[in-house]
């Protein structure tokens, strides 16, 4: 498969937080929809509160048609908020975790790790979306999921199409290595970053990659282009644009980083 330089890659529109829109194989994909106004969400007992601090750079009404939502998980408001839930009713297909598929209803399909689904392309042919591992905290899945819930990422592939990785809220470089073994090199990686952490859980450990880990993930994946998301607009992020730029520069990967 030929690899396109970053300058000619398909555009990825980032809205703040984890939400990004891109067209791939003639279909329009939206990641983790969050469009609520800034607010603090009520937290279940023992869980940290989530505070949105910035307005999204677009609205559901301005998206245009969306064919597929790639939802890394449905249980946290910073990945699926009230406006995002309302939007799902108008989207033909939402791909998410197995548990999320059960909770969200008939338009949602839950995928287990390494499970794939083929989607028809408007011009003929198909593309494939494969669910890939993600762990939303420090430790093994068995240690993390009872506290942070189930999360998945996605890899998109197709004939004459670039390979795209959407990480979801993943903190595990071991999971990235598993993905790389099957799919590297990656043409475009949409990496969730921001080094989020809460004192109340995992002893303040990272629940998604920090900037240096995002750069390391880029190397592991041999990713040609990285579009970071989910590093702004919420109070629990501890690193942002400056740290990402510094980490990628230190790793000699500045030319692969695409910030909106």
Image (spheres, rainbow, N blue to C red):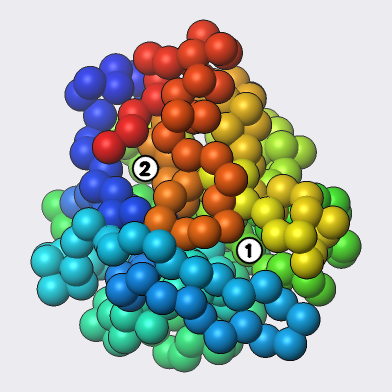
Residue that numbered label 2 is attached to = 158
Q: Residue at left 51%, top 80%?
A: 41
Q: Residue at left 28%, top 63%?
A: 55
Residue that numbered label 1 is attached to = 151
The crowding category of the residue bearing disc 1, from other C-alpha atoms within 10 Å (few below 14, some 14 to 19, many at least 20), is: many
Dividing the image into 4 quarters, which one contains the N terminus? top left
Dividing the image into 4 quarters, which one contains the C terminus? top left
Asked whether residue 153 appears in the rendered view, the answer is no
Q: Position of residue 237 (x, y in %)?
A: 55, 51
Q: Quadrant of residue 157?
A: top left
Distance between mark 1 and mark 2 Cα atoms: 24 Å
Does 255 sit left or right of 91 as displayed?
A: right
Query: In the structure shown, which secondary structural element does the residue marked by tag 1 occupy?
Result: strand
| Residue 213 higher or lower than 39, as above or below | above
Query: In the structure shown, which secondary structural element does the residue marked by tag 2 occupy?
Result: loop
Does 126 sit left or right of 186 as displayed?
A: left
The crowding category of the residue bearing disc 2, from other C-alpha atoms within 10 Å (few below 14, some 14 to 19, many at least 20), is: some
Q: Position of residue 112 (x, y in %)?
A: 64, 65
Of 83 and 152, which appears nearest the observer? 83
């Amino acid at each position: 498969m030929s690899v396109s330089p970053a300058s000619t890659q398909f555009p990825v529109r980032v809205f703040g937080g984890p939400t990004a829109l891109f067209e791939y194989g003639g279909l329009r994909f939206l990641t983790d929809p969050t469009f609520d106004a800034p607010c603090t969400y009520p937290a279940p007992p023992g869980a940290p509160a989530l505070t949105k601090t910035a307005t999204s750079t677009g609205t559901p009404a301005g998206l245009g048609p969306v064919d597929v939502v790639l939802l890394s998980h449905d249980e946290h408001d910073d990945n699926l908020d009230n406006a995002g839930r309302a939007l799902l009713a108008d989207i033909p297909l939402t791909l998410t975790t197995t548990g999320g598929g059960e909770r969200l209803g008939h338009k949602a399909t839950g995928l287990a790790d390494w499970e794939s689904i083929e989607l028809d392309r408007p011009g003929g042919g198909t593309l494939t979306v494969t669910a890939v591992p993600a762990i939303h905290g420090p430790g093994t899945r068995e240690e993390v999921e009872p506290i942070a819930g189930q999360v998945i990422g996605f890899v998109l592939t197709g004939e004459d199409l670039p390979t795209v990785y959407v990480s979801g809220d993943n903190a595990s470089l071991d999971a990235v290595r598993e993905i790389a073994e099957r799919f590297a090199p990656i043409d475009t990686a949409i990496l969730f970053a921001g080094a989020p952490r809460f004192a109340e859980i995992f002893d303040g450990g990272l629940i998604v990659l920090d900037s240096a880990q995002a750069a390391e993930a880029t190397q592991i994946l041999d990713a040609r282009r990285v579009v970071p998301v989910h590093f702004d607009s919420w109070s629990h992020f501890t690193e942002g644009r400056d740290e990402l730029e510094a980490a990628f520069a230190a790793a000699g990967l500045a030319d692969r980083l695409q910030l909106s």
